[in-house]
Image: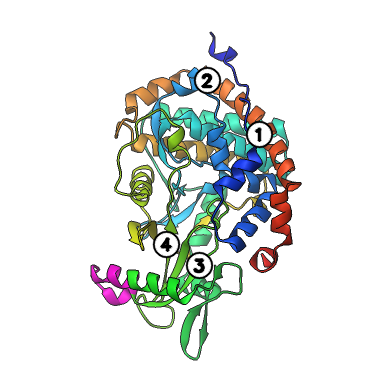
Amino acid sequence: MSLLALPCAMPSRADPLRKIASFNKGRHPELLALKYRKMAASPFGYFRGTNHLFHADWPGHGWLERMPAVWLNGDLHLENFGTYRGDNRLVYFDVGDFDDGALGPLGRDLVRFMVGVHIAGYEMGFGARRAQALNRIFVAAYRAALIEGKARWIERRTARGVIGELLMKLDRRTQADLLAKRTVTRNGKRRLRTDTGKALALSPEERARVVAFMKRFAEGRAVPSFFKVLDVAQRVAGVGALGLKRYVVLMQGDGGRDGAALIDLKSQIGSTLAPRLKQRQPKFGSEAARVVAIENRMQAVGPAFLAAVRIAGRSFTLRELQPSADKLDLSITHPERAAFETVIAAMGELTAWAQLRCAGRDGATDIEGLMAFARNTGWSRPLVALAKDWASVIFEDWRSFRESKLAAWAEAQTGLARRT
């Protein structure tokens, strides 16, 4: 069979609403209501909140499964690219959020991204034809970067256009800017704000568990006083992980008026992608250790303080919250033709560079194999076509979700879900 005639049809599926309810069972009710409200509000919010459905619905065509195995982000989409400050203190623009990372066929990440471009078009004001053109640009840039066979990176000194402007702007942000947004000082004591929709107060018992963990964590550090806890709260961020245990910790840091530091502790419950893959997955010490290992492999430079830890038997990733960390925000990104095409091309390159960076490791295809695959152009057109068909299915699922009992329940909730 010619690659151009490869099947792209979506498989028949079980009721997505039932799967959504089952997947989110046991989450924090107030945060779950917020998650469902975000999912009902836009098709891209729904797309972000249902990565587990995307991988469960993956069509099992042989040509997709025979694509080279690479280390995958697992949830590749426009808003999972952004800036961060590396452990060398330089600001980079790269792929982020590796909670669903795993070893599998490279088409998984490519199709996830391209479906997301179609879905994002609804919010950004362009249709299917424009989305397909952008996806062809993404694939072309991805292929060219693989063929070159050299992993590069994007940082402030080398970036141009929209990404360059974003890096320049964020590089000027200070710790004082971050603290002004996230904290308040009362009676000379700095505390986390819980009135902005970014954090919720914890019970005394849960707060005590996090404080006890941070005390143990600090004991192994060169400057233990840096990690002295000033306050702890439940962090509210993202879409897919809303409702899971996640903390923001305010620490003493370097001391002084603007020396305080913030830590993000995010529970890791396992990849929604890994159980769907035929590739044998390496054994990691914990789910957080898996995320940390994959992130360190795929990013050009690891973020500050990134570590796998345990709190009360649960697996968490620990990382610094930074004034220069930001994602590409679709609500403020104008899809002007030339500028946005440059961003999409850069994302294709970054995807290829991330895969090249860990080529040959723990079962991944080596660099020569990836280069040879990229030289064959036959797979790109059916992949772009599959993304278009799949996006249509997700639009219909979103419309059903908007009218569902799950969305009605979330709409009826008060508190955070209503305020945000």
Local packing at callout 4 (Cα closer than 10 Å; few below 14, some 14-19, many 20+) is many
Specify whether residue 367 is painted magenta: no
Local packing at callout 1 (Cα closer than 10 Å; few below 14, some 14-19, many 20+) is many
Residue farthest to the bottom?
187
Q: Which mark is residue 234?
A: 3
Q: Nearer the viewer, mark 3 or mark 1?
A: 3
Name the spot of residue 275 as percent of width and height, x first: 44, 36
Query: Contact, CB < 8 Å: mark 2 with mark 1?
Result: no
Residue farthest to the top?
1
Q: Which mark is residue 265?
A: 4
Q: Badge 2 is on which residue?
A: 61
Q: Tell me how far mark 3 sits from mark 1, CA to CA.
A: 33 Å
Query: Contact, CB < 8 Å: mark 3 with mark 1?
Result: no
Residue at disc 4, secondary structure: strand
Mark 4 / mark 1, whichever is N-terminal: 4
Using the image as rendered, state which of residue 367 and residue 272 is in the foreground.
272
Q: Is residue 337 visible?
A: no
The amino acid pointed to by label 1 is Ala
Mark 3 / mark 2, whichever is N-terminal: 2
* Relative to 7, 171 lies left or right: left
Name the spot of residue 267 as percent of width and height, x first: 43, 56
Name the spot of residue 73 as percent of width and height, x first: 45, 41
Mark 3 / mark 1, whichever is N-terminal: 3
Q: Quadrant of the C terminus?
A: bottom right
Local packing at callout 3 (Cα closer than 10 Å; few below 14, some 14-19, many 20+) is many
